[in-house]
Amino acid sequence: MDWGILEREPELARLASAAREAADGAGSVVLVFGEAGIGKSSLVKALPDHLPDGTRILVGECDDLATRRPLGPFRDLIGSVGGELAGAVTEGGDRHRVHEALLEELRGAVLVVEDVHWADEASLDALRFLVRRMERLPALIVLTYRDDELSREHPLRHLLGQVSRAPRVHRLPLARLSLDAVRTLSAGRVDPAQVYAVTNGNPFFVAEIVAAGGTGRVPPTVVDAVLARLRGLPGATVDALEQLAVVPSAVERPLVDALLTDRVSDLAAPQENGPLATGVSAPVDQHGPLTDGVSVLAAAEQRGLLTVTPERVAFRHELIRRAVADSLPAARRIGLNRAVLAALVARPGSDAARIVHHAAQAGDQDAIARYGPDAAKDAAATGAHREAAAQLWLVLRERHRYASAELADLLERYAVESYTIADSAAAVAAQREAVALRRALGDTLALGADLRWLSRIHWWAGNADQAQEAAREAVAVLEHAGDDRLLALAVSNTAQLRMLSERYAEAVEHGERAIVLARKANDPAILAHALNNVGTARWRSGDPDGRAELEESLDVALAAGEVEHACRSYANIIWTLLDNLQYDEADTFLPPAMELADRAEHLGFLNYLHVELAMRRLAAADWDDAEKHAEYGMHDFIPARCPALTVLARIRIRRGCPGADDLLSEAWEIAVGTKELQRTGPVALARAESAWLRGDAKGVIEAAAPVHAQVSRLPGAPHRSELGYWLTKAGHRVPPDDSDHPYALQARGQWRRAAALWQAAGCPYEHAAALAESPDAATKLEALAAFDALGAEPAAHLLRVELRRLGVRHVPRGPLAATRENPAGLTDRQLQVIRLLAEGLTNAEIAARLVVSVRTIDNHVRAVLDKLDAPGRRQAAVRAAELGLLPGGSPT
């Protein structure tokens, strides 16, 4: 009986089917997930027997290291793949080379990456690259992970969100074994009901307890079950198991030999002060002293605890390794980790990340200080920025070991890595400390460069005042330092901040100076940066010639291969076109911009561009698509999160869904911190629209008036016309707006011209809203039909009230089909939520299942409770069952 595949026939069939489809050119991704011990690895091991003959299968594993091995699962493929991929992974520094080699190697293959919840950032980066291309690749990717270990901030969340949007994805949640399956496994040796009661059908727990044969009572934990199976093994074998258990990965044969052979030799010849610093006695088995490392493992292999091959040794299950390691006294674990550390240091070419992991576990601060910086460098070179930050955090705990200049370098590196992974607080703190050290050292150039970085990091964190202050000092320090390049970058940084804070004339002044300096230094990256600032400032202040400079910045960046600067140019072009209602032109820039960011793996800009696409889809009233793209911005990157929240809130406002106020509260807090009109303006507009649809004229004025006063003082400022329109509707007097913006026309009562402009721009919701302002009942009815078709319930409700007040008879009641089909009026997403809620899942578990943020699920749950008129979750499930909304008709 193969315990590992019991009750797994459907999953194996789906995997085999997906592999056949991939072989025919329809590549896909399979997610195999469940709790620890549910049988993910057993399913993978059974897979080859169910694949078409000749199918090439590649298997890599992620390790539970404190700081992950960069490209760990792909390093496992070396020996099974071609030289190009092996070389790219071994060298590791060229991320694009790794990605392209993976893409080529994967054609016609099945790639399995096990335990991807432990993947390093470089591996996640590579998987994101592959996932985006699976539709066109004749291959299958199988990812296994523990879904019960994914926190809200877990790095795997981003990859799972991307997978969920892939054209072909298969989800295989693994269920626990049934009582019948446990009865089969027990085979009369132990009480199956008792086993089932204790294990709840977890296959690993069941297998371990059954293998232990029972002890009169079922062991309460898996540790007890594993330790029961260790009883009776030779002492040397137990010692060897404990030694290997502190290595959180499969152990390659040279390391096995170093740990066990040398150790056994030491144990066989006791020294004056004892055989080991830990005081472990010399093991001797029944055949006498051991001299070969692997042979000592034979008894453990026979018990099914280990898998031994000529290349490596691995515990049969990760939980076995953890159970052994967790059973050890702390002092023993320290000694065993010290042995691994010594073996790794003695071996040329050992991964610095592994060295640092065991150094940390052994408490060897000298080793951390010596190898940590190199481990961080290796991780950063492969794009594993989370791992690089973690390594540097360990190093900086021993900051007293470094001279001031070296410490400043390490702090700069930590700040950059933290900035890259959006840990703004850590980035700001580290960069501030680096600046203080540079100031004390009197290193003018380094101080100026660090101040410029500090300004950028402050802006990233949403701290406008601190960003401006650091930028001012950076220029002052570098003004006469004699380095045109550093000065150009500092001046351009100042121009960027002035542009973002709507100080357009100052932005142009600083930007033009930066352009001169950049040309003198012959630096195309800084030239593109400066042209971007000048062009954006001029264009947004009403000078159409600014667009040419902004597009020139794009051309310079693309020609120089400066992808980051090109992405920023694209982003500013698109944002301004959207503000100017030039949607068709924005549509021509969005695809190449997103393709560039995607190809270069600039995920920050890619997410930002997705949010801009969400803004575009909101204008087109394609609200489902807008929500999907806005979700890309729901991360800690403040510049993207604020507009993403605003788009999601405005969709809820127009659909009449709860939760918009919470989203707007967070968006407003972020926007106020940035002191940027591009953030405060859209949030104020959404708050004003929400208040108007609630019938709250005072709320409209409170939301719109302060920002309107600000924009009225600026030339060519966006949002002025719409803010003025809402204030006019609320009865608040504003200075006349004689522009041809459709909202200005509506404010002046020219609804027909406005409607025509909205229709030409492709904005159906705004078009309907303009028609609704007609005094003609027939035109109002036309607007009502448009609102109903869009699902814009609040606007439709207000218009129905107005039509009845005007005495119009036979006002349409609105769409009823959806209500008949779904008596509670729940959206498709809310139906999904109530069904998962009825299964007893928490909001975090629902968020994980649907691959959205917990905050989003919080909003959905509140909406469900409101629509079902239920005071709590249990009552909501009962009400949903009564309405026939649950598959089985009743909650569990």
Image (spheres, rainbow, N blue to C red):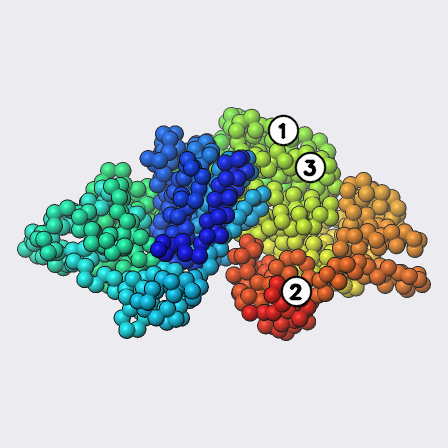
The quadrant in which residue 450 appears is top left
In this image, 841 relative to 198: left or right?
right
Q: Residue at x 55, y 63 (%)?
A: 843
Query: How packed is label 2: few (under 14 Cα within 10 Å), some, or many (20 or more)?
Result: many
Query: Does the residue at mark 1 contact the one at mark 2 (Cβ under 8 Å)?
Result: no
From the viewer's side, name the closer residue of 352 and 575. Answer: 352
- The amino acid at mark 3 is Asp
The quarter of the picture where the N terminus appears is bottom left
Instruction: Give the quarter of the image for residue 496.
Output: top right
Mark sitting on residue 587: 3
Q: Is residue 837 visible?
A: yes
1 or 3: tag closer to the N-terminus: 1
- Checking the image for residue 552, the label placed there is 1
Which quadrant is home to the C terminus? bottom right
Q: Earlier in the sequence, mark 1 or mark 2?
A: 1
- Percent x, y of residue 396: 35, 50
Mark in the foreground, 2 or 3: 2
Between the C-alphas of marks 1 and 2, the distance is 56 Å
Separation of residues labelled 1 and 3 (CA atoms): 19 Å
Q: Earlier in the sequence, mark 2 or mark 3?
A: 3
Q: Amino acid at mark 1?
A: Glu
Report the amino acid beneath label 2. Answer: Leu
Residue 500 location in percent, x, y? 62, 44
For the question of whether residue 509 can be seen, the reply is no
Which mark, residue 885? 2
**SS label for mark 2:** loop
